[in-house]
Image (cartoon, grey):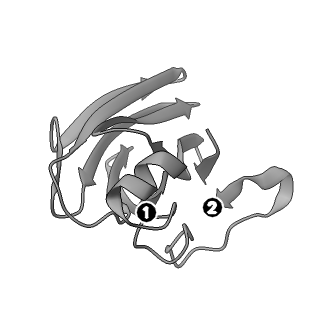
C-alpha cells in the first residue's frame, strides 16, 4: 500500500498513512502508524464521505520513543466514492498541533464496474488534495 508521511521535528514524530485505499468490497481497513523520539499523544479522527461509516470516530495512542498504530474499519452503505478526511491532533510538551489530510480511494476494476464509477471513484483521479507539497522521490509523499 503506497504511504505518505508527515514528519514533526524537535522531538521527532512520524505520522504514516495510506495515500489511498483500494476498495474491493463494502468494507476496508484504514491503518495509521506513528513513530516517535520523545513523548507524543496522538488522536486520529476520520470523516468518511456521506454513505460510508467508520467503526469509531477517533482513536488515540500514546507514542513514547516507539512504534504505535491505530486502524479504522470503514463500511460503504451506499453513496459517493470520494476521499476520506483525516484529522490528527498531536500533543507534545503542552503544545497541540493539528494535521489535516485526505485519503483517496481506488476501486478494483470489478467494483468500479459494479458501482458505475471510475477506478478512482468520483474524486479528481486519486490526487492528494492537501495544500502541502508532496515529495516525488521514491513514489512517496513527504510532508513537513
Q: Helix or strand or loop: what does disc 1 sit on?
A: strand
Q: Is residue 7 left or right of residue 140?
A: left
**How packed is label 2: few (under 14 Cα within 10 Å), some, or many (20 or more)?**
some
In terms of image quadrants, where is residue 11?
Answer: top right
Q: Please determine whether, in this image, residue 119 is positioned above or below residue 16.
A: below
Identify the residue shown where x is 53% and y is 22%. Answer: 67
Q: Which label lies toward us, 1 or 2?
A: 1
x and y, in percent, of residue 138 in the image: 84, 50
Task: Tell which of 139 and 77 is nearer to you.
Answer: 77
Q: Helix or strand or loop: what does disc 2 sit on?
A: strand
Can residue 78 be seen here? yes
Identify the residue shown where x is 44% and y is 37%. Answer: 32
Task: Tell which of 133 and 122 is nearer to you.
Answer: 122
Identify the residue shown where x is 35% and y is 30%. Answer: 71
Task: Tell which of 116 and 12 is nearer to you.
Answer: 116
Instruction: Give the Cα distance between marks 1 and 2.
Output: 10 Å
Which residue is identified by label 2? 143
Q: Please determine whether, in this image, residue 62 is positioned above or below residue 76.
A: above
**How packed is label 1: few (under 14 Cα within 10 Å), some, or many (20 or more)?**
some
Say which mark, if any, is on residue 101: 1
First in sequence: mark 1 or mark 2? 1
Q: Please determine whether, in this image, residue 24 is positioned above or below residue 118.
A: above
- Would you say the residues marked 1 and 2 are in contact, meaning their CB atoms lie under 8 Å apart? yes
Amino acid at each position: 500500500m503506497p504511504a505518505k508521511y508527515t514528519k514533526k521535528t524537535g522531538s521527532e514524530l512520524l505520522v504514516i498513512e495510506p495515500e489511498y485505499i483500494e476498495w474491493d468490497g463494502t468494507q476496508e481497513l484504514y491503518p495509521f502508524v506513528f513513530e516517535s523520539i520523545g513523548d507524543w499523544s496522538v488522536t486520529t479522527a476520520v470523516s468518511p464521505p456521506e454513505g460510508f461509516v467508520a467503526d469509531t470516530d477517533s482513536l488515540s495512542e500514546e507514542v513514547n520513543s516507539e512504534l504505535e498504530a491505530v486502524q479504522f474499519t470503514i463500511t460503504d452503505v451506499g453513496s459517493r466514492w470520494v476521499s476520506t478526511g483525516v484529522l490528527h491532533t498531536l500533543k507534545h510538551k503542552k503544545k497541540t498541533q493539528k494535521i489535516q489530510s485526505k485519503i483517496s480511494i481506488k476501486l478494483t476494476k470489478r467494483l468500479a464496474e459494479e458501482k458505475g464509477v471510475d477506478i478512482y471513484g468520483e474524486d479528481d483521479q486519486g490526487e492528494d488534495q492537501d495544500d502541502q507539497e508532496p515529495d516525488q522521490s521514491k513514489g512517496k509523499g513527504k510532508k513537513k
